[in-house]
Image: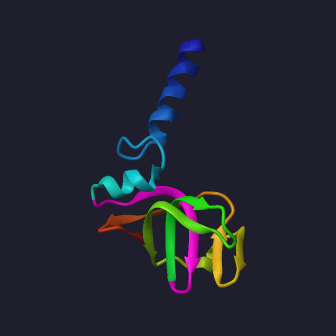
Amino acid sequence: MKALVLTLLTLIVAGCGSGGQSGPLSVQQALDGTSGEPHLVRGALIATGETIRLCSAILESYPPQCGGPFLVVEGLDLGSLEGLTTADGVTWSDRQVELRGTVAEGTLTIV
């Protein structure tokens, strides 16, 4: 019985990955190079005007600003996300979000 449970857990964990990817990529990992296939990327979301960025960090200003490396996000409907805050023309996520898309030349295109 113990061997059966261990085998099932191994299969479940192995099935959770995507192409050897054990979890979402950081913004920096996505910028460093991806295969052109869709990836899950984690970061802090900040939108100003028409520009949406997935940032490595949020600076503690008010409203917050993008800190560190970032990806420009295309094809994202902000209305589809919950938990966003807006002030002074800036919309941001209070916690990190995960977005799936392809990365090319500093842009994450949502798929």
Residue positioned 60% across, 62% down in the render: 59
Q: Quadrant of the N terminus?
A: top right
Question: Does 90 appear above or below 5?
Answer: below
46 drawn magenta = yes
Q: Is residue 83 visible?
A: yes
In the rendered image, the residue lying farthest to the front is 61
Report the residue at 49% width, 81% height from top.
51
Residue depicted at x 47% and y 31%: 11
Q: Position of residue 54 (x, y in %)?
A: 50, 65
Q: How many numbered badges does the structure rendering display?
A: 0
Closest to the observer: 58 or 79? Answer: 58
Q: Is residue 111 visible?
A: no
Q: Outermost residue, top direction?
A: 2
Provide residue 16's location: percent of width, then percent of height.
49, 42
Q: Position of residue 42 (x, y in %)?
A: 52, 55
Q: What kind of secondary structure does the magenta stretch mostly adopt? A: strand
10 in the magenta segment: no
**Residues drawn in magenta:** 36-50
